[in-house]
Image (cartoon, helix red, strand yellow):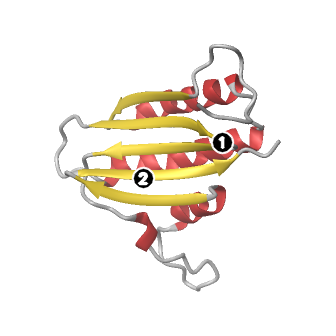
Amino acid sequence: MATGIPSPAGASASSEIRIANSLSEIARVAELVDAFGARHQFTNEVIVALNVSLDEILNNIISYAYDDAGRHDIVVRLELLGGNVEVVVKDDGRPFDPLVVPEPRLQAKPRAAGGVGLHFVRNLTDRLEYTRRDGINELRFMKELKQ
């Protein structure tokens, strides 16, 4: 159970959703983030950071992680941990460790395409971790809840 975070009586300290690998499903995740953030009185800054980060991460998974056109499930979990919100995204796509992707050279002329979305995620979150176990990618990020 989280401590130090005001939340309404009976409100869950975690919330999870399972979506299909379809770009249209990202809206359902945004609704979950908005509702979870409202329930636990997150600042607008935190809600925006979570939504932008998840939009980028999920868009990358859905667009690039799968070698087939079949249905795949992606799990997103939000959890209050102390003065932080932790987000876990799990998928069964190709292994991809975003931590090894170099920072984009934003000032380069011409600038190489790609990499900017992960740059946003790194700058909007306070911790980012990746593991792969038993064919499942697990990306975990944390955002501090400033009061």
Badge 2: few (under 14), some or many (20 or more) residues near its Cα, within 10 Å?
many
Q: Nearer the viewer, residue 47 or 85?
A: 85
Question: Residue 26: horizontal and vertical position, in percent?
Answer: 47, 35
Residue drawn at (54%, 76%) of the image: 104
Q: Tag 1's secondary structure?
A: loop
Q: Earlier in the sequence, mark 1 or mark 2?
A: 1
Q: In the picture shown, does residue 16 fall above or below 107?
A: above
Residue drawn at (73%, 33%) of the image: 5
Question: Residue 66: horizontal and vertical position, in percent?
Answer: 23, 50
Q: Amino acid at mark 1?
A: Gly
Q: Nearer the viewer, residue 25 or 33?
A: 33
In the orientation shown, which residue stands out farthest toward the right? 147
Q: In the picture shown, does residue 137 fall above or below 37?
A: below
Image-based side of 114 in relation to 75, left or right: right
Asked whether disc 1 touches disc 2, contact meaning CB atoms under 8 Å apart, the reply is: no
Image-based side of 9 in relation to 77, left or right: right
Question: Residue 105: horizontal and vertical position, in percent?
Answer: 57, 81
User: On the image, which quarter does residue 43 sit in?
Assistant: top right
Q: In the picture shown, does residue 139 fall above or below 17?
A: below
Q: Which mark is residue 139?
A: 2
Residue drawn at (76%, 38%) of the image: 44
The number of numbered badges drawn on the structure is 2
Q: In the picture shown, does residue 115 fall above or below 78?
A: below
- Quadrant the C terminus occupies: top right
Q: Amino acid at mark 2?
A: Leu
Mark 1 highlights which residue? 82
Image-based side of 6 in relation to 94, left or right: right
Question: Residue 45: horizontal and vertical position, in percent?
Answer: 75, 44
Q: CA distance from mark 1 to mark 2?
A: 20 Å
